[in-house]
Image (cartoon, rainbow, N blue to C red):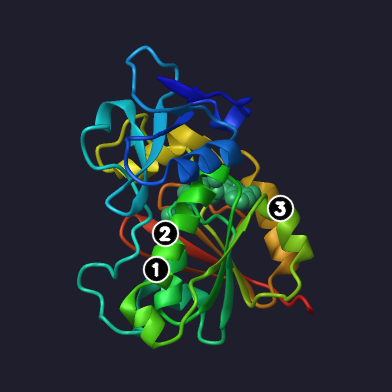
Amino acid sequence: MRLKTLNSRPCASKLAVLYEQNGNLVNYQQLASRLSVPLYDTVVADKLETFFLTWRDGSLKLFDKESLKKDGLAVEIEHRQGEQRSWPIAKTGALAQALGRKTKTVVDATAGWGQDSLAMFRMGYEVQSIERSSIMAELLADGFSRLSKLDWMQQLNLSPPKLIQGNAIEILSNLPDQPDCIYLDPMFPPKRKKSALAKKAIVVLRDLVGDDMDKELLFATALKTAGKRVVVKSPNYAEPLGGKPNESFHGKLLRYDVYLTQNKG
Ligand SMILES: C[S@@+](CC[C@H](N)C(=O)[O-])C[C@H]1O[C@@H](n2cnc3c(N)ncnc32)[C@H](O)[C@@H]1O
């Protein structure tokens, strides 16, 4: 049954909120209303929507129609496998090298599933996360809220990264405080149409938000704004986004290109 229909926005036209008789209906109504998408209480095969948002097991999750009976995708807030269980963890690896020893504050201008924001947060950087997709911003807000309730976060009196929803190209120029580093991980076209190596979360994200066609403009804005450096994460097959970088650090199948800046705050 369709509970309520609101005008769809183009970016959200593939999405509906799904109420599975679980939890407070008002939360679902408010989510559907914030995203201007329909709210359903069952999934009918001929519905046009490809994606559904619903709360399961205490997390807001994104499902595609095929995976509705399986686990959906939520912002993962736990430490990664093999990572120290403390805070802050050691600043090691290619990401930390790319961020540089003098960096304290980072704006992640392409937050997505929040995994890089959270990796930087766990290393003790002060992180702000910008995301323009309102759907991804809802998933991030839910993840950051779950993070804030974890025991270790409360014991250490920590707040999760600050989330800003909107287009970083506009937001970066109006930040009240200049960050040391602006971190970019825009969506690059895949090397092959279907890669067995591409993670489900990235495949779904690409399907939902598409490739980031304005990444050059985002880079140019970041370069004018960052106090000390811009770090661009890209697949190792892609050309550097801003021409020859000052330094590059290599991870598995990816690269962090570093562009040094000297902008005064
Ligand atoms: C490849 S994903 C980032 C994945 C992320 N690094 C992670 O760890 O999950 C790119 C994300 O950046 C967002 N994005 C791209 N351009 C943006 C912009 N100009 N402003 C804000 N968000 C942007 C897209 O909506 C998408 O969610």
Is label 3 within 8 A of ligand 1 (CB to nearest ligand atom)? yes
Mark 1 is on which residue type? Leu
Label 3 to label 1: alpha-carbon separation: 27 Å
Residue tagged 1: 147
Q: Residue at x 45, y 59 (%)?
A: 114
* Mark 2 element type: helix
Q: Earlier in the sequence, mark 3 or mark 1?
A: 1
* Mark 3 element type: helix
* Label 1 with label 2: CB-CB less than 8 Å: yes
Question: Closest to the observer: 134 or 151?
Answer: 151
> 80 left or right of 215?
left
> Residue 206: horizontal and vertical position, in percent?
45, 37
Residue tagged 3: 169
> 15 left or right of 45?
right
> Residue 143: horizontal and vertical position, in percent?
41, 59
Question: Closest to the observer: 37 or 244?
Answer: 37
Label 1 to label 2: alpha-carbon separation: 6 Å
Which of the 4 image quadrants contains residue 34?
top right
> 49 left or right of 194?
right
